[in-house]
Amino acid sequence: MKSIFDESDIISTYSRAQAISDGVLVDISANYKNEARLFKFPVAFTQSVFGLVEAVAKDNFDHQSVIIWDILYMSIHLKTKILSESEHLFSVLIGTQTHILKAICSGGDQGEPVLTFLTEFED
């Protein structure tokens, strides 16, 4: 019996760093440090979540910062459904619409804790 960590059976991997480099994830900790300070772990949004921010705030960095702060703050204070110890749904107003988003704490590229924010039905 092989260990589940035996790399000889791995066909392909896609790291968090690659996802950030490709634009699949947006590194909030690097680009919005003041807002990300709410968490002690690195924070990233999927492109879908960041797209919600951009749809309302366009190229206005200050307005984007406010929306990102709201998303991160509400992820702490308005949990609507606990999915597991490391995942929950929460509500947040972005522009004039309420959205249900998902926060996941998982292992990063080196197994370190990282936070990823997704739309409700993304995995």
Image (cartoon, grey):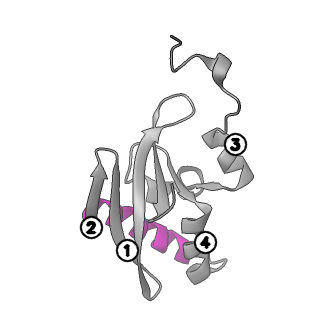
Q: Which residue is mark 4?
A: 51
Question: Mark 2–mark 1 contact, CB under 8 Å?
Answer: yes
Q: Is residue 55 above or below residue 117?
A: below
Q: Counting other residues with Cα less than 10 Å from the Cα at mark 4, is it few (<14), some (14-19), or many (20 or more)?
A: some
Sequence-wise, the earlier of marks 3 and 4 is: 3
Q: Which residue is mark 3?
A: 18
Q: Which amino acid type corresponds to the residue marked 1 in the rendered image?
A: Val
View extreme (front): residue? 1
Numbered circle sitting on residue 81: none
Question: 106 or 40, which lies in front?
Answer: 106
Q: CA distance from mark 3 to mark 4?
A: 19 Å
Q: Which amino acid type corresponds to the residue marked 4 in the rendered image?
A: Gly
Question: 61 or 73, which lies in front?
Answer: 73
Residue at point 62%, 54% (across, down): 25
Sequence-wise, the earlier of marks 3 and 1 is: 3
* Residue 82 highlighted magenta (yes or no): no
Question: Mark 2–mark 4 contact, CB under 8 Å?
Answer: no
Q: What secondary structure is marked by label 1?
A: strand
Q: Which amino acid type corresponds to the residue marked 2 in the rendered image?
A: Leu
Give the residues drawn in magenta, as a range: 63-78
Numbered circle sitting on residue 78: 2
